[in-house]
Image (tube, rainbow, N blue to C red):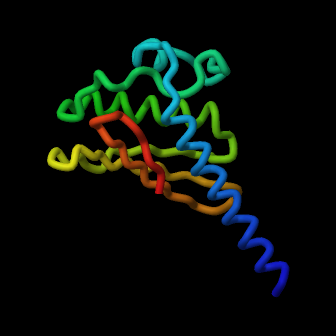
Amino acid sequence: MIRLLEDKYLQDDIHFSVKSNFDYILNTRNTLTVNEFLSLQASQLNSSNFGLPNVNKLSLANEEDKESLCSCIKLALNSFEPRFKNINVSFQNYDKNKRVAKICVSGFIDVNNATINLFLHVSVWKFNCE
């Protein structure tokens, strides 16, 4: 019983750590354009281009821009958060009145399924993870 509790706390700590790292990765901007960033292989990403490119020029009314944003998120998370595997990123919705977009990131932490909801506050282009 104690071992199960310890495993649960350890798993909770890992989930918290991954979400904290997501927050750091997605709210750090590098100097690349979206196209330059997406043209890189994961092996070409390093500390000099850590984070996301400048995505604040993307329009959330444009389907291609939404796909580019999701692709940037996936590439950054694949490159800089190795504990999160088999990542799938999907744009859920955009509330124009609140200026908040919801993006769903799903994958595996260890052997457990995990889904992390990202909320992009468009007025400042800042992500919050839940």
Q: Examine the rendered structure and indicate whether residue 51 appears above or below residue 34.
A: below
Judge left or right: residue 35 versus residue 99: right
Q: Residue at x 64, y 33 (%)?
A: 80
Q: Residue at x 49, y 13 (%)?
A: 31
Q: Position of residue 84 (x, y in %)?
A: 63, 47
Q: In the picture, residue 8 is in which quadrant?
A: bottom right
Q: Position of residue 92 (x, y in %)?
A: 30, 50
Q: Position of residue 76 (x, y in %)?
A: 54, 31
Residue placed most toward the observer, 67 or 117: 117
Q: Residue furthest front?
A: 124
Q: Examine the rendered structure and indicate whether residue 124 appears above or below residue 10.
A: above
Q: Residue at x 53, y 43 (%)?
A: 23
Q: Examine the rendered structure and indicate whether residue 123 appears above or below residue 4.
A: above
Residue placed most toward the observer, 36 or 9: 9
Q: Residue at x 32, y 25 (%)?
A: 56
Q: Residue furthest left?
A: 97
Q: How many marks?
A: 0
Q: Examine the rendered structure and indicate whether residue 6 appears above or below residue 114.
A: below
Judge left or right: residue 42 versus residue 36: right
Q: In the picture, residue 70 is in which quadrant?
A: top left
Q: Quadrant of the N terminus?
A: bottom right
Q: In the picture, residue 127 is in which quadrant?
A: top left
Q: Position of residue 99 (x, y in %)?
A: 23, 44
Q: Residue furthest right?
A: 3
